[in-house]
Image (cartoon, helix red, strand yellow):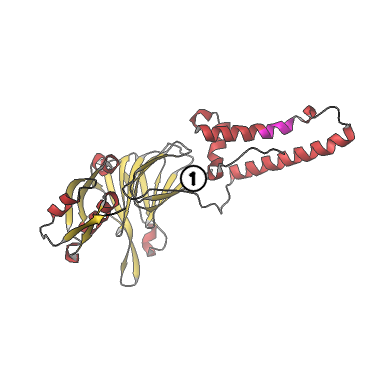
Amino acid sequence: MNIPRFGLGARAASVFDRLLGGAPETLHPDDRRQAEEFWAWLGGFEAPHLAEEAEPAPRRWPRIGMAVAAGFALLLAVAAYWVQPPQSVDGISYATAHSERRSLRLPDGSAVSLGAESQVVVRFTRDERRIRLVAGEALFDVAHNPRRPLIVETPQGEVRALGTSFDVRLSRDGARVTVVEGIVRISLASGAGADRRISRTARAGEQVRFGIGRELATEIGFIEEAMRVDPAQATAWTRGVLHFRGEPLDEVIAVVNRYSREKVILTDRSLARMPVYAVLHEGDTAALVELIENPDGIAVAGRTR
């Protein structure tokens, strides 16, 4: 039995949803070809009379029955996967290297822009679209679908949207979401004590920082008040420009180092929480050094890989 290649993996649900839902033109050509070939192959079992007529009937029916049974079993398997993807599937991972940016087009039509040294894991089901931001920063342009919200997970909490555009950056102190268009809802991850029930809505032009901190031995979750920002500045990293509006110096250095071929080192830890207001081009470590009044506060090491 010549079974066509079927490597759609976790994308199968979305691909067949659009193929059979009247929107095949929105699929990637390779995904559409695989899905159509597999669907056509299954359809071949609906016409057993096309088998070789010269073969005696008593021998033909068992073979045809086996083929139909095999095709029906595969059809049920595809249908089961389509309706409820296996829970053991972790998703598809995408990552960028040092000083690299990458743009992704997801099966549902959403787009993701990954910053340097960033990683996301994408897992779609029939009921929701879930993306885990493992490291770095990403800009999400979400295709509108009220029946399947898109949820971005972070270690500190999650951001839920139906159709909007927003940026999420991870740092040591938590996560920061900037809404470019639409509305999102931010909620804390479980394990943040009583504060895990807290959620907050953010609208276009607003930025919210959230996370889970520690006070003595107790975890305390927080979602700060939204502050007004310029979304174009917050997403300027996609165009090679880094805007900082009061972020602590150690966080600024971490971001700058992801894009620079040279490594900035904080030599005076007393400056770690110093707020930085600056506009820097990727790789311009000299400009960051000039911002520090203490010439021994930071240093620039040799080129990194």
Picture layout, residue 261 above or below residue 180: below
Query: Within the image, what quadrant is residue 273 found in?
Result: bottom left
Q: Position of residue 76 (x, y in %)?
A: 67, 42
Q: Secondary structure at mark 1?
A: loop
Residue at coordinates 18% horizontally, 59% vertically from top-left? Answer: 299
Picture layout, residue 162 above or below residue 20: below
Category of crowding for the residue at label 1, using alpha-carbon neighbours closer than 10 angstroms: few (below 14), some (14–19), many (at least 20): some
Q: Nearer the viewer, residue 81 or 292?
A: 292
Asked whether, in this view, residue 224 is left or right of residue 142, the answer is: left
Q: Nearer the viewer, residue 38 or 128?
A: 38
Three-letter amino acid code of the residue under disc 1 = Glu
Q: Residue furthest left?
A: 293
Q: Position of residue 177 (x, y in %)?
A: 32, 48
Magenta highlight range: 41-46
Q: What residue would you read off at disc 1?
A: 128
Would you say residue 263 is visible in this rendering?
no
Would you say residue 240 is visible in this rendering?
yes
Residue at coordinates 59% horizontally, 42% vertically from top-left? Answer: 82
Q: Position of residue 280 (x, y in %)?
A: 20, 46
> Chief secondary structure of the magenta span?
helix
Residue at coordinates 20% horizontally, 51% vertically from top-left? Answer: 285
Asked whether, in this view, residue 252 is left or right of residue 192, the answer is: left
